[in-house]
Image (cartoon, rainbow, N blue to C red):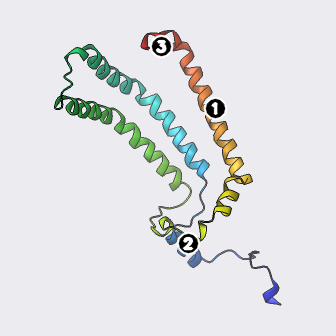
Amino acid sequence: MAEDADTTDKTEDPTQKRLDEAHERGDVVKSQEVTTWFIIAGGTLVLASFAGTMGQGLVATMRGLLANSYKISMDGQALPSLFQHLGLELIVSLAVPFLLLMLAALAGNMVQHKLVWSTESLMPKFSKISPMAGLQRMFSKQALANFLKGLAKLIVMGSVLTMMMMPERDRMEGLI
């Protein structure tokens, strides 16, 4: 009679041992939306805090590059040096904001569960390599819901960006 019982209906909570084993495997409950909103909030704070200084640094670099473009040598030695200089300027300007965004993503995960460091979840599972199962996953209700959520986020962020850029549209024509 016990064999006829549905094993998917769990009537008791998992033991602490099972929870710890699942955590060691990297099998934790996590909402991607929480992490996404932490990143969006962090990105907003980063832009509000660093946009002016980042923009000034990049504008100064580009202004110097364009003003002295006739002096730039295009031989085999000078061009890699120029790209190295520009890359370094870009890294210096963007390092702190990117670091803060990574910390926001980490905080979004840490709010939900303690730190997980497991290579088991990175290993490929050959049982999941099925074209039919992949197609069913791609065209499921869950995938449609995720697509609609992503589209809504894109529309909201695009609208906010458009509202922020509209007052500056007259100045932007000079950039082209």
Tell me the kind of residue under disc 1.
Val
- Under mark 3, the amino acid is Met
Amino acid type, residue under disc 2 in the picture: Ala
Answer above or below: position of 18 versus 143: below
Give the residue drawn at x 25%, y 17%. 69
Q: CA distance from mark 1 to mark 3?
A: 22 Å
Look at the image and tell me in which quarter the C terminus lies.
top left
Q: Which mark is residue 22?
A: 2
Q: Which of the numbered marks, if any, corresponds to residue 142? A: none
- For mark 1, what is the residue? 156
**Secondary structure type for disc 2:** helix
Which picture quadrant has residue 99? Answer: top left
Q: Position of residue 21 (x, y in %)?
A: 53, 75
51 with respect to 137 (left or right): left
What residue does disc 3 label?
A: 172
Q: Position of residue 27 (x, y in %)?
A: 56, 67
**Which corner quadrant holds the N terminus?**
bottom right
Q: Earlier in the sequence, mark 2 or mark 1?
A: 2
Q: Earlier in the sequence, mark 1 or mark 3?
A: 1
Q: CA distance from mark 2 to mark 3?
A: 53 Å
Q: Residue at x 65, y 75 (%)?
A: 14
Secondary structure under badge 3?
helix
Q: What is the x, y in percent for residue 15? A: 62, 78
Which residue is at the front of the view, 154 or 99? Answer: 154
Distance between mark 2 and mark 1 Cα atoms: 37 Å
Callouts 2 and 3 close, C-beta under 8 Å = no
Q: Quadrant of residue 87?
A: top left
